[in-house]
Image: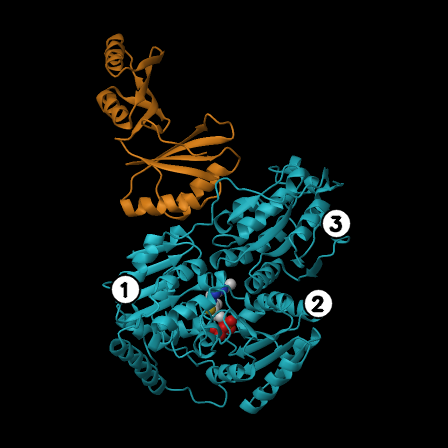
Chain colours: A cyan, B orange
């Protein structure tokens, strides 16, 4: 057992947790930690704004399914992290945010750069630690990872006063810890699984609604096995996009405010909905009172508090969805055949709806449209390529027109809807998987919020592709103003946009501006091959809208198909 | 009214986390008391809330999610002993008033805590209903100040705390 500073103990503990990357930015209150970093094997990625550090840690975590780590100093450094922490909280992503804090004797004195960051982040962290002595640090690190990664994952804050970073302590890293009030591993109740199974086997028109929980628990093979075993069509929530291969014959794609028309329609016609790791968000189901009103709803979730929160259900299976699904599949009799007749009718209905909407949704005519650009990207990007998105129309177009083939390769800020998330998150994702191309599907407004991460992508050799659907507008807000405010545009024109190609080049990135589908084709191929960060600037028409659309406050049945 | 008896870590910041959860989830707290338990590292919080069964269920689940919350028992009037303490100061300028109030206090098993030429302060311990009843009874004299502690409660009989 060696003696070392609290800061060195922190770094040693992080190494023991097998941390590969730290995304952060130093300041007065975390100088001892940055000093300890010099002797550490962990790679530090210097960001240009702490918000991006949190998003990078988040992007890393979503790919690795392991906590990502970010560092910030106290006060403004810590508050800059908040948007990223809240984003991770809303999407149940495990990140560990380590903030410096003023020295213990200064706490509460309104000291320089003092912020009560634990108070500030209380509603958006799973837990927060503030060691009072360096000797507490190793155990707190171990607990932070345990809490962040287990059960329903989420962000944990570790706020370390500067004098505690400097204190000398023995380094004792526990092999095993227990957190008294925290028992995240619940094995699902077998009788509830039985009940769910019975309901499901009786259903004539069942549908699976897969959510983010499927991705978080990696339950892809189980989900696919269940769907195939009983021939059940699968819709996904927005966060669940990519939980199921979207080129599968049972896939209907996303439902909700900007879901596929056939998916929204099919959900309304079902007689049994199996929600797996989904929380019935208002964006997914529209009006709670209308959704799944007279039918059986079966809910699988790891978080007991999600059961009955937004929607009362007929069977609730609480536990890790991967193991719950395994148990469910075992209960399905080997020789069970869905009533062939009925099942055929249901699947025929699916095909009918898909074809109907494919024909009835008119394409916006122009050389390059968002839809065409995204279809092209899908065609050229390898199946394992990772995609993140920004927020707005770009995000919804990605949801509608970019099919995820390899499960767990699509990530977006779905819960908080954070503009500026996608680009830094894509850099974090690249750090987690540098063997596949990583693309951020962006709008110009969102990209402007964290575009300075270009420096990180270029200098840290984490090259990603920014697929910029450039309408020189805060497009989604403009669409709402067109639709609900009689075209009274307010605050949506991005006047004096920079030349994004020049901007990218000034950071040392590669850039293409494309004006035809041919050029786009070449630009995509070139960027996938390239090993520098690339911005593809794709001018699109500011009037192109996202359809279908379920207006807020209405139900899925009121879906608007087009203008 | 529901009474939640919640065992929590006896640490700084825990009360804040709990009250903040009520605020951010739009739940209402009628009263909340905290004090140390038989184990020095644990505190017992007694929270009373008026809500329907569905909201209560969500409330308990959300509370359970907090890492500092070790155990929750939902109690009600039948399965709990519960008490509140109130100090009630009344205007009592003439001696007969003071005697009347003192008599009422005796009937309610209250204690006179302070008497001055102008005021009389009574301590009442009991269920919130009983305290309300006493307050109504003496309201005619002019209540000057009231301090109530909120409810403290324990389950009746043996409920195993698996702590
Ligand atoms: C940080 C933040 N601020 C504001 C919003 C509200 N908002 C939602 S979509 C949107 C427009 C996004 O514009 P852009 O990134 O250019 O994408 P587009 O809709 O044009 O594709 C805005 C402002 C938000 N989601 N996040």
The quadrant in which residue A499 appears is bottom right
Give me the C-alpha separation between circle 1 and circle 2. 49 Å
Label 1: chain?
Answer: A
| Image position of A480 (left or right of A384) | left
Q: Are marks 2 and 3 in contact (CB under 8 Å)?
A: no
Residue A325 horizontal/vertical position (percent): 41, 61
Which quarter of the figure is the C terminus of chain A placed in? bottom left
Residue A393 horizontal/vertical position (percent): 46, 74
Residue A50 horizontal/vertical position (percent): 62, 58
The quadrant in which residue A502 appears is bottom right
Lower position in the chain sequence, tag 1 or tag 2? 1
Q: Residues within 10 Å of mark 3 (few under 14, many from 20)?
A: some
- For disc 3, the marked residue is A36
Instruction: Tell me the element at label 1.
Output: loop
Q: Residues within 10 Å of mark 1 (few under 14, many from 20)?
A: many
Q: In the image, is residue B86 above or below residue A405? A: above
- For disc 1, the marked residue is A292
Q: In the image, is residue B69 above or below residue A348? A: above
Distance from mark 2 CB to nearest ligand 1 atom below 8 Å? no
Q: Are marks 1 and 2 in contact (CB under 8 Å)?
A: no
The quadrant in which residue A138 appears is top right
Label 3: chain?
Answer: A
Mark number displayed over residue A259: none
Give me the C-alpha separation between circle 2 and circle 3. 20 Å
Lower position in the chain sequence, tag 2 or tag 3? 3
Mark number displayed over residue A460: 2
Give me the C-alpha separation between circle 1 and circle 3. 55 Å
Residue at (66%, 55%) from the top-left corner?
A18
Lower position in the chain sequence, tag 1 or tag 3? 3
């Amino acid at each position: 057992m060696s003696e070392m500073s609290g800061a060195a103990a922190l770094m040693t503990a992080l190494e023991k947790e097998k941390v590969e990357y730290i995304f952060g930015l130093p300041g007065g209150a975390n100088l001892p930690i940055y000093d300890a970093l010099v002797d550490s094997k962990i790679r530090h990625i210097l960001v240009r704004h702490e918000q991006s550090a949190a998003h990078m840690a988040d992007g890393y975590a979503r790919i690795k399914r392991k906590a990502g780590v970010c560092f910030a100093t106290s006060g403004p450094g810590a508050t800059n992290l908040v948007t990223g922490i809240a984003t991770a909280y809303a999407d149940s992503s495990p990140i560990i945010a380590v903030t410096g804090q003023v020295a213990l004797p200064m706490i509460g004195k309104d000291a320089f750069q003092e912020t009560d960051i634990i108070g500030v982040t209380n509603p958006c962290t799973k837990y927060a630690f503030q060691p009072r002595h360096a000797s507490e640090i190793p155990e707190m690190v171990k607990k932070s990872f345990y809490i962040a990664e287990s059960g329903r994952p989420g962000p944990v804050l570790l706020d370390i006063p500067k004098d505690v970073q400097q204190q000398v302590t023995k380094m004792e890293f526990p092999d095993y810890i227990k957190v008294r009030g925290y028992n995240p591993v619940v094995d699902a109740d077998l009788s509830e699984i039985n009940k769910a199974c019975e309901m499901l086997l009786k259903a004539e028109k069942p549908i699976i609604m897969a959510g983010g929980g499927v991705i978080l628990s990696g339950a892809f093979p189980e989900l696919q096995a269940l769907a195939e075993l009983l021939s059940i069509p699968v819709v996904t929530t927005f966060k669940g996009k990519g939980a199921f291969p979207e080129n599968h014959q049972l896939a209907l794609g996303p439902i909700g405010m900007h879901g596929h028309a056939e998916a929204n329609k099919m959900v309304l016609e079902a007689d049994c909905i199996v929600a797996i790791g989904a929380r019935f968000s208002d964006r997914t189901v529209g009006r709670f009172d209308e959704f799944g009103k007279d039918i059986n709803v079966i809910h699988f979730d790891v978080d007991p508090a999600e059961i009955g929160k937004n929607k009362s259900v007929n069977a609730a299976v609480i536990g890790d969805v991967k193991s719950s699904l395994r148990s469910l599949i075992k209960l399905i009799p080997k020789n069970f055949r869905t009533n062939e007749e009925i099942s055929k009718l249901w699947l025929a209905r699916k095909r009918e709806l898909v074809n109907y909407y494919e024909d009835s949704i008119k394409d916006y005519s122009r050389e390059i449209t968002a839809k065409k650009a995204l279809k092209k990207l899908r065609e050229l990007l390898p199946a394992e390529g990772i995609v993140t998105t920004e927020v707005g129309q770009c995000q919804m177009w990605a949801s509608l027109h970019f099919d995820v083939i390899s499960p767990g390769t699509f990530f977006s800020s779905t819960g908080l809807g954070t503009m500026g998330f996608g680009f830094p998150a894509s850099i974090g994702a690249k750090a987690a998987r540098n063997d596949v191309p990583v693309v951020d599907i962006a709008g110009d407004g969102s990209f402007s919020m964290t575009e300075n991460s270009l420096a990180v992508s270029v200098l840290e050799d984490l090259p990603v592709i920014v697929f910029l659907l450039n309408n020189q507008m805060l497009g989604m807000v403009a669409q709402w103003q067109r639709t609900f405010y009689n075209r009274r545009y307010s605050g949506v024109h991005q006047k004096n946009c920079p030349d994004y190609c020049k901007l990218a080049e000034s950071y040392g990135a590669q850039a293409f501006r494309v004006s035809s589908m041919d050029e786009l084709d070449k630009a995509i191929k070139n960027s996938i091959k390239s090993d520098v960060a690339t911005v593809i600037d794709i001018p699109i028409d500011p009037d192109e809208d996202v359809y279908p659309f379920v207006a807020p406050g209405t139900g899925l049945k009121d879906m608007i198909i087009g203008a | 009214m529901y009474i939640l008896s919640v065992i929590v870590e006896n640490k700084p910041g825990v009360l804040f986390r709990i009250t903040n959860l009520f605020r951010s989830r739009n739940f209402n707290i009628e009263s909340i008391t905290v004090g140390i338990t038989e184990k020095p590292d644990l505190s017992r919080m007694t929270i009373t809330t008026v809500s329907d069964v569905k909201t209560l269920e969500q409330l308990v689940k959300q509370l359970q999610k907090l890492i500092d919350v070790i155990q929750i028992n939902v109690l009600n009037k039948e399965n709990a002993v519960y008490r509140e303490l109130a100090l009630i100061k009344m205007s009592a300028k003439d001696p007969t008033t003071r005697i009347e109030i003192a008599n009422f206090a005796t009937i309610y098993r209250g204690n006179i805590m302070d008497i001055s030429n102008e005021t009389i302060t009574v301590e009442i311990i009991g269920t919130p209903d009983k305290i309300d009843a006493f307050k109504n009874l003496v309201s005619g004299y002019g209540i000057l100040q009231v301090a109530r502690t909120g409810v403290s409660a324990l389950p009746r009989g043996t409920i195993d705390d698996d702590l």
